[in-house]
Amino acid sequence: MTENEWLAERFEDNRTHLTAVAYRMLGSPAEADDAVQETWLRLSRADRSNVENLRGWLTTTVARVCLDMLRSRRAHHAEPLDEAEPVAHDGTPEHDAILADSVGLALLVVLDQLDPAERLAFVLHDMFAVPFEEIAPIVQRSPAAARQLASRARRRVQGAEAPDDRARQRELVDAFLAASRDGDFDALLAVLDPDVVVRADLAAAAMGADAEVRGADAVTKTFAGRAKAARAAMVGGAPGLVWAQGGVPRVAFVFVVARGKIVEIEMVADPERIESLNVSY
């Protein structure tokens, strides 16, 4: 076996792990694949004489690649690539792992609101147990500062997920649906956080939805009287809404609830992402 063949084999041994890291960082299967491929290219060009822990080196490298991608996305206000161009699920083990993973879309929605450095620190430490001493050089901070980044991210994630149980979320989503159908502005305002934000992926925007709507008043005007065809469903393991056509879900509505109010709604129309949400009625 040549050195390149040995290296390729070791890389394949770590591919599922790297894809899982990249998916949590980027929230996009297509971009995760791109990040993993870039990691392989960097490995093939790197001086490996001082690499004692290949898995650690690969994890650090894919994290750096993802951090650059997140910063570029934020700078250009870009959506994840696979929302613009759906990518067919290829059935490979790494895709099965990330799509079957317990990280729901609601959590990914919250992670998308984090600063890239906060997201990296939280994902690497809380999800993959990477020490802060190894995270610090990636974000160009001290270990103590990296710990603070993860702590801030953790508070935001817990603030969005912990306060409201599933029954309460179902009550809010049902009330939102009823008020939307009836065009009841006051009832809609009652369930929405004042700073609520609604985001549509590019597939939903292509169907006529606004890419982003902020504030309870604007969201109320967007939905009042316009959800007559939607129905309650479990979306990504949490109460949500679905608009179906011919029995096939076309748009899924993912809700993030905190402090007894709806704080975020994501409209997902990308077929691959809808399939990954395991919609059930």
Image (tube, grey):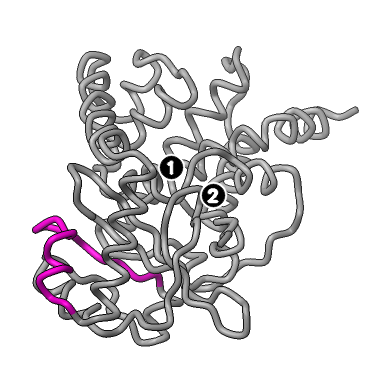
Is residue 65 found left or right of 32 in the rendered image?
Answer: left
Give the residue drawn at x 24%, y 71%: 212
Q: Position of residue 221 (x, y in %)?
A: 15, 80
Q: Position of residue 109 (x, y in %)?
A: 35, 51
Q: Would you identify the image quadrant in which residue 216 lies?
A: bottom left
Q: Amino acid at mark 2?
A: Ala
Residue 200: which disc? none
Secondary structure of the residue carrying numbered label 1 = helix
Q: Going by the image, does 40 lie left or right of 23?
A: right
Is residue 209 shown left or right of residue 245?
A: left
Residue 193 lies in the magenta-colored region: yes
Q: Residue at x 37, y 65 (%)?
A: 79
Residue 146: x and y, percent? 26, 22
Residue under numbered circle 2: 32
For the residues bearing labels 2 and 1, Cβ distance under 8 angstroms: yes
Which residues, given as a range, are shown in magenta? 184-201
Quick one: SS at disc 2?
A: helix
